[in-house]
Amino acid sequence: MAPAHVASIAPSLSLPLRIEGVVKRFGGLTAVNGVSLELNSGECLGLLGPNGAGKSTLIRSVVGRVIPDSGTVSVFGARADSSGAREALGWIPQELALYPKLTCRENLQSFGLYHGLRGAALRTAVEWCLDWASLTDRALEPVAHLSGGMKRRLNMAAGLIHRPKVILMDEPTVGVDPQSRNRIFEMIETLHDEGVSMLYTTHYMEEAERLCDRIAVIDHGRVIALGTKDELVQNAFASRSEVIVRFAKAGDGVDGWVKERAGVFEDGMARFTIEHANEVAGLLDSAGNAGHELADISLRKPNLESVFLHLTGRELRD
Amino acid sequence: MRTGLIALRRDRGAFALSFVLPIAFFSIFAVIFGGHRDSTPKVKVIVVDEDHSTASQRLIRGLEREGSLAVKKKPASKKGGEQLDYTATTAEAAVKDGTAPVALIIPHGFGENPISFGASGENRPPIQLLKDSSDLIAPQVIVGLLQKVAMTAMPDLMAEQGSKYLDRVAGGFTPEQRKRIDEGLDELRRLEDSDEQSSASGDSNRGMPVAVATRDVVGQNRDMVSFYAAAIGVMFLLFTASGASGSLLDEAESGTLDRVLSSRVTMGNLLAGKLLYSMLLAFSQLVVMFLWAWLVFKVDFIPHIPGFVVMGLSTAFAVGAFGMLLASICRTRAQLGPLSTLVILLMSSLGGSMFPRYFMSEAMQKAGLLTINAWAIDGFTEVFWRDEPISHLWPQVLVLLGIGVLFWTAARRLARRWEYS
């Protein structure tokens, strides 16, 4: 798959993307608070965090739609606002940034023209995008007539029309049904296999686990943890397991009882970490003695959700 | 009802449209058609006296005393000296260039037989009324007032002509009757001479016609279709341009604008592209409108194509930039709708798209010059009505291009808010 457009900066030894100390404030709100990240060649780096964590603002800082108050962003060593960097970057925004009255093909042609593609290069790029997004048979359909999943796929394809080397995906699966989401995952995995470097923001743990080589956990504009999924879990829990307890009837002082055992109580559920499985029996005895009736109890290996809860004291979905 | 009221209060544009627009329009119509009597415009009329007789001078004095007329016997004085009186030639030129909508030429021999009855007046020279047919009102006002002034400013001549008519038709007066008639006429002359300051008002029912020969010197054999094509066309161009430029707001709301600006396209490129699109749309609309007027209403389009193109492009540029400015001012498409409706209807009513500006007072006519409509309609009138060459369109073209540049610059400046956050 030869790139239809060759970026004017050479993908040399410089990192595809380097973010250093980026700060962005909107009035009294600090949306991004000193974020530094590096994206390696061919890597998919996940930005995992709840809504409002600053993920989109960071992505918009990279793509030049937001001017950071401080910090720098470079793409293959070039300033992010240089024309070469712009051509090397592909941005897939969270919104459906398409022309609803134009057909799929006309949309792709328009965005291709905006990126300077002409003639055969444009035609080739449009056909590749339609094929990649499985929209070839809907090429002449106006966007307004497409299903939600198809619009999402076209939205992604439009960001890739100029065949960028670094792709910034801002929650590309928001509002998509499970079937379409799987199709989108396959599209992203195709790009990953081709060695494209990607920064992928999401607040879905399972997406980050499936797609990303490394994950940066972001909250309140700060990166609070960075590593592979296993590294993050290991750093947060070491060899400990997680116990999740649901109460059928929680007695008075359940909150204090959970805290005494270094657990977190939220939404009628308590989470504890234990080193050995036999600690579960002690937990059950203690709950019975304190008058708390349990509905069920489960033991599981910690995941990214557990990591986020461990680091922030809040659920990821918040 | 509650939800309707809450929604109306939240939607400031609709709120303004509901209350401000009716008040604004009511005020404009009230100012134009009533209420401010002092500001009712005077009808300009150029008068050329070729006769220099007592009758012609008295007729002119009578016209001058009419409060609704502004009689001009010579062009406005310039630096360096007094201007000469209008002649038939210069008066016709003045009507052609729009100085006044009507000129009256009182011919040699008018005083010998100023008023006549029936067939007796067939051989006398009539007063020439030269008119600009784009003004439907002024010529009719002048003709009516001319008759009125003849009857009231020259009662002795009327009576004298009446007695001559009777003398001829009835077979002559007796010496005693003749003597009494002459005494009566002397009395009328004394009354007229002693009452120079009196108004020319009087009993207008005793109709005695002054012969008037009317001639169109502008817009000969043309109806008002080309005027309306321009007037209505410009108003709809403004709506089209504001609607077209609203795509900028749609794109900003959907996020498409951000995506476009993350490519090679700059905000300047984008606005220029949208301006060109609006211009193309507006110009095409004008072409279709005038082609329709040509095919269906027989407007003389083909010989005027060069002037039409110049005026069409200038107007399209101005309205395109106007649309971009409105879109840049507004935050959302919902704001653009009411604001553009308000501004366009105000501009159209003041600028002559809804009714000709000569209906309006001097002050309103001057205010109309602040609108795109007025300059565009003036320009098209110059082309289609006055047959002016392209070189004579420079004031309208210059103003429209100036408006376009000004609006475009302001729009570009306001659009900076979309560039970065």
Image (cartoon, coloured by chain):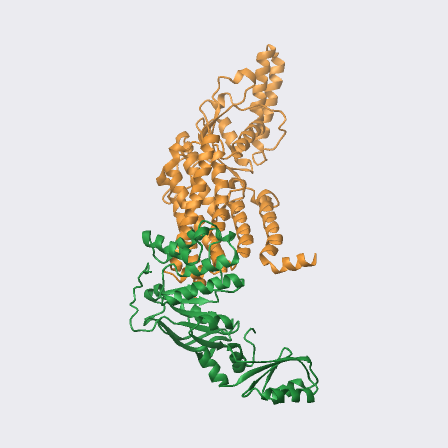
On the rendered image, what quadrant is the N terminus of chain B found in?
A: bottom right
Where B38 falls versus A316 (above or below)?
A: above
| Residue B212 placement (x, y as % from top left) | 51, 25
**Image quarter of residue A309:** bottom right
**Quarter of image, res B155:** top right
Residue that protrudes farthest toward the front in the picture = A278
Say if A31 sits above or below B190 in the image. below
Q: Is residue A122 left or right of residue B61?
A: left
Q: Colour of chain B?
A: orange
Position above or below: A135 against B33: below
Q: Give how far across and how far down residue A193 sits, in percent.
A: 38, 67
Position of residue A20 in the picture relative to residue B54 (left or right): left
Q: Could you say which is closer to the camera, residue A203 or residue B278?
A: A203
What residue is shown at x 57% (from left), y 20% (from top)? Answer: B160
Considering depth in this image, is A23 or B311 the residue closer to the camera?
A: A23
The answer to which of B307 and B152 lies nearer the viewer is: B307
Farthest top residue in view: B171
Residue A310's spot in the image, x, y percent? 53, 82
Q: Is residue A218 above or below residue B303?
A: below
The C terminus of chain B sits in image quarter: bottom left
Q: Is residue B71 visible?
A: no
Residue in front for this viewpoint, B224 or A307 = A307
Residue at image x 45%, y 57%?
A154
Q: Position of residue A65 (x, y in %)?
A: 42, 66
Please tell me how many numbered marks the rendered image carries.
0
Query: Which one of the lettered chains is coloured green?
Result: A
